[in-house]
């Protein structure tokens, strides 16, 4: 009986199913209120929902604003808006049925993230850590909140970044061409889901190919093949953008606006959200009048001019964004702790604990001389950089929460159990994806060394 229970608790299909049911249990009691709030009062998905509605209504990939109709857009990469548009086409634009279906997808994306989380944890620190991290994702508050409340690419981006990290760990040192072709396709799909994911593409890909560096020609062939597949995946969208806008826009066009919203004279400490054209009618009209490309270019010029002329303010903003990104902290705790409701205090404690454990896990992995500390550390340090410069929130951090969770679980195990520091069931031998010559070329083992 104990053996059967253990097998059941370690079964990834069971963990995924329970994660789905947990999220469904939180969503169903609030479905009517959610529909009223995010569909009737403010159409869900905001800009991405507006683009999806335009596609479903035959107006093409256009009109990201809710207050005015505008022309073609490259505000987003295409995968998620087209997913929403397909649902709208089948079940009605902003309909109650569409609301149910898209939340079903969001919940499924979040639940399936347990799978790559377990793969990352197992490859990095052993099976116990992998399974424990998957179970932790089942009940992680942010992993429940975003798929239940938000209609955005947030949950899909988290799933995909976890898949990319898991694939990188598995691929390291492999000379299988088919695997590298698949790796390029994974990154291409990630770029079409949320372009922010590719901020960690160069360091992760370099880490994966590094063991083959002594065999330069085969390594270059593998890397070139992956790069070619990646390029093939994004070229159609890039061509579409060039044809429509007459300018090279490989992925999305809204960087200038996001940079300006976080760097202009009206910003208090993070960003001036009320100046967003989806909230400010004057800005919306200006956007429609100028059209998207000139509007975004103007905002980018204004933002860089502000950054150059206000270095002290820019530094202060970056510090605030850093705090907000990691702790969801707008003001000093001393200013609000005495009057804050219990759930605000609990949220603050959770955010601080989660971020601290993730960083400790990374430090412990480095201390234990774990080679996998390198790619996980790359994600932790590189992925947030764009948001420090533009504007930040926990939602923008969420795609890297699976990586943070694996590190946090490892940190707990490292402190609680000395055996967890050198997991016996971590993969001490070369994986099937590596040849003997690949393994010999590696300078560092994939697992934790004593």
Image (cartoon, rainbow, N blue to C red):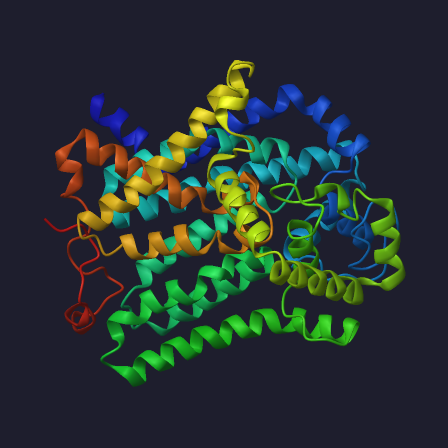
* Label tally: 0
Q: In percent of the image, x 49 and y 25: which residue is there?
A: 333
Residue 246 sits above or below residue 305 on the image: below
Q: Is residue 190 left or right of residue 32?
A: left
Q: From the top left corner, tell me how far across and down residue 246 is, in percent.
A: 77, 76
Q: Residue 14, can we see it? A: no
- The residue lying toward the viewer, choosing from 123 and 196, is 196
Q: In percent of the image, x 82 and y 54: which residue is there?
A: 63
Q: From the top left corner, tell me how far across and down residue 164 is, in percent.
A: 43, 56
Q: From the top left corner, tell me how far across and down residue 243 is, in percent.
A: 76, 75
Q: Where, quadrant-wise, is the N terminus in this rendering?
A: top left
Q: In percent of the image, x 16 and y 31: which residue is there?
A: 417
Q: In percent of the image, x 18 and y 61: which residue is there?
A: 430
Q: Is residue 188 left or right of residue 31?
A: left
Q: Is residue 41 left or right of residue 405?
A: right
Residue 19 sits above or below residue 450 on the image: above
Q: From the top left corner, tell me how far across and down residue 437 is, in percent.
A: 17, 74
- The residue lying toward the viewer, choosing from 3 and 222, is 222
Q: Residue 327, can we see it? A: yes
Residue 222 sits above or below residue 369 on the image: below
Q: Is residue 82 left or right of residue 369?
A: right
- The residue lying toward the viewer, choosing from 358 and 25, is 358
Of all residues shown, which one is farthest toward the bottom?
217
């Amino acid at each position: 009986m104990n053996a059967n229970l253990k097998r059941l608790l370690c079964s990834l299909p069971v963990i995924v199913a329970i994660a789905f049911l947990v999220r469904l249990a939180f969503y169903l009691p609030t479905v009517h209120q959610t529909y009223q709030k995010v569909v009737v009062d403010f159409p869900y998905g905001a800009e991405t929902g507006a683009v999806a509605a335009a596609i479903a209504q035959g107006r093409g990939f256009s009109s990201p604003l809710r207050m005015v109709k505008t022309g073609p857009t490259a505000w987003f990469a295409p995968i998620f808006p087209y997913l929403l548009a397909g649902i709208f086409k089948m079940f009605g634009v902003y309909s109650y049925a569409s609301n149910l279906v898209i939340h079903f997808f969001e919940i499924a994306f979040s639940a399936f993230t347990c799978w790559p989380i377990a793969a990352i944890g197992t490859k990095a620190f052993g099976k116990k850590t992998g399974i424990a991290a998957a179970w932790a994702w089942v009940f992680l508050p942010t992993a429940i909140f975003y798929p239940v409340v938000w209609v955005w690419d947030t949950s899909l981006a988290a799933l995909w970044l976890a898949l990319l990290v898991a694939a990188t760990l598995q691929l390291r040192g492999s000379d299988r061409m088919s695997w590298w072709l698949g790796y390029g396709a994974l990154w291409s799909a990630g770029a079409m889901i949320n372009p922010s994911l590719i901020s960690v593409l160069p360091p992760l890909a370099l880490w994966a190919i590094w063991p083959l560096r002594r065999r330069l020609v085969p390594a270059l062939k593998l890397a070139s093949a992956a790069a070619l597949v990646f390029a093939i995946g994004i070229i159609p969208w890039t061509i579409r953008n060039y044809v429509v806008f007459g300018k090279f826009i490989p992925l999305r066009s809204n960087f200038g606006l996001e940079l300006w919203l976080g760097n202009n004279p009206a910003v208090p400490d993070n960003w001036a959200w009320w100046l967003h054209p989806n909230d400010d009618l004057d800005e919306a009209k200006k956007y429609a009048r100028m059209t998207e490309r000139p509007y975004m270019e103007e905002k980018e010029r204004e933002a860089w001019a502000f950054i150059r002329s206000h270095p002290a303010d820019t530094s202060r903003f970056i510090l605030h964004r850093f705090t907000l990104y990691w702790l969801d902290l707008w003001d000093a705790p001393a200013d609000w702790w005495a009057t804050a409701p219990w759930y605000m205090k609990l949220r603050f404690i959770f955010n601080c604990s989660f971020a601290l454990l993730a960083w400790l896990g990374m430090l412990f992995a480095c201390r234990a001389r774990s080679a996998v500390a390198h790619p996980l550390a790359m994600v932790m340090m590189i992925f947030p950089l764009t948001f420090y410069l533009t504007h930040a929130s926990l939602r923008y951090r969420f795609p890297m929460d699976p990586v943070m969770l694996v590190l946090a679980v490892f940190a707990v195990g490292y402190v609680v159990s000395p055996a967890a520091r050198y997991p016996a069931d971590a993969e001490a031998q070369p994986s099937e994806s590596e040849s003997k010559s690949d393994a010999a070329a590696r300078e560092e083992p994939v697992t934790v060394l004593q």
